[in-house]
Image (cartoon, helix red, strand yellow):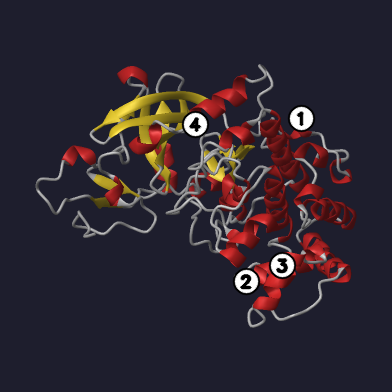
Amino acid sequence: MANPFVFMVLEDMEDEGDYRSGGLFPVKLGDVFGPEGSARYRISAKLGYYGSYSTVWLARDLVANRTVALKIVRASETATSRETAILKHLSTATPGSHSPAVLQLLDSFILTSANGSHQVLVTEPVILLDALLALHGIQVDLRSVVHQALEGLAFIYERGVVRLALFAPLFVFLITPNLYPRNMGAAIDLDSLTEVDIWSECGPPSIIPLVTCEPAHDTASFPPYLTAALDLRGLLARGFAPREPRRTLQKSPHRRDATAPRAFMAPEIVFPIIAHGNRVPPWDWRADIWGMGCTISQIAGGGLPYEHSGTHMLSGIATLCGGAPADWTTYFASVPDKIPPRAYTPQDADALWTKTMEYIQRWGQTAEDARRLVASLRRMLVMDPMGRPSAAELLRDPYFVGTVLEDALPSVGGLSSLEPTINAQRIHEDTSLTTSSYSSKDLDLG
């Protein structure tokens, strides 16, 4: 299909073709939105987009005098979107017990455009964990961050949200293969900053004008320009530290699909995909525990504890787990050119975990903390999903003995205050995420 607009958009912008009937809501900087046509939320900057599902914007709440994030959902998805209902369920299921590790829904309403009706969710601004860890100068209280992530998981599971997510295939909300660093983030407090402050620290956005190739194209269906996402690194360098961790509630930003990285998928999810081309394998919460183990490993030691590229991922998992199920062994025998025949023994697993423990120590953990953390990871990263503990059970692991979560939450939720001399360089390059991109907040809903 030919590009309906004159100029090509930048890589970190949404697809201009999504501005059509049933598509995205056309937003421009300075727009003011609110429930029932009220003028409450003034758009300051774009935080990101989630494939063709939604765009997310930084805005100023003119009534409460605070900075918020607005997620505006595609018109064709609004009628079936369950995000608002799930967030409200989590905040009201047990009054007074809302988990601080779960996204806070501040407001919701419907907007109407030439493209249809659009659900709007108002939340705290959030920056993805991946983006935070890609900045030099970030000091992470690993035990506190992991504790809070598990606490959020336990809170969500206890309220039956996993079951609700079964009816929301468009969300990555706790769909088990989708628990990974780009679905976790930290709320940031920007309330003390004006719009001018924000732009002076972050710089002006890149803008591409939308000029239609067809004069008959309805100009009300698309904005006058597309804008790149705000780069929050300038604000972080000034010391605006994340205040609390959050599990994200939306699709991975800057991706054309909602599929989580294969490297974080549990064995029972990834094997049918690789071996049989099954794109919709069965799953349950136990696969989320595997994803959490991978996420913790990446945060603690800078990477996953096993080879995870292509077909070799299966061999890597078998090595990590110290054995391969019969159907895996049969598949390995059928592709000797891809996976050379070999035995997978508990001794192989012990050697791999010993290396992982060494990496974790290099990244700042004491020998005893590294030992206890690896013991927890070995419980999470097991081949048999029935052998994985729940999030609530993991919270009782020896690694968390002595952790006082209450002491961490009021400040920056496990992330220490940032020094003003942060060198905002990446630790690694990620083609699907930039440090300026918004981390869809909270529950992993998608």
Q: Which residue is mark 3?
A: 328
* Residue 74 seen in the current view: no
Alpha carbon distance from label 3 to label 2: 12 Å
Kind of residue sitting beneath label 2: Thr
Q: Earlier in the sequence, mark 1 or mark 3?
A: 3
Kind of residue sitting beneath label 3: Trp
Which residue is rendered at x = 64% and y = 47% of the image? Answer: 283
Choose between 180 and 241: the one closer to the eye: 180
For the N terminus, the quadrant is: bottom left
Numbered disc 2: secondary structure: loop
Choose between 213 and 60: the one closer to the eye: 213
Dividing the picture into quadrants, the one containing residue 426 is bottom right
Numbered disc 3: secondary structure: helix
Q: Earlier in the sequence, mark 3 or mark 2?
A: 2
Q: Residue furthest left?
A: 215
Q: Is residue 271 above or below residue 120?
A: below
Label ID, residue 406: 1
Dividing the picture into quadrants, the one containing residue 32 is top left
Label count reads: 4
Density class for disc 2 (Cα within 10 Å; few <14, some 14-19, many ≥20) is some
Q: Earlier in the sequence, mark 1 or mark 2?
A: 2
Q: Which residue is mark 2?
A: 311
Alpha carbon distance from label 1 to label 2: 43 Å
Alpha carbon distance from label 4 to label 3: 37 Å
Q: Which residue is mark 4?
A: 82
Q: Nearer the viewer, mark 3 or mark 2?
A: 3
Numbered disc 1: secondary structure: helix
Kind of residue sitting beneath label 1: Glu
Which residue is rendered at x = 62% and y = 32% of the image? Answer: 161
* Residue 166 seen in the current view: yes
Q: Nearer the viewer, mark 1 or mark 3?
A: 3
Density class for disc 1 (Cα within 10 Å; few <14, some 14-19, many ≥20) is few
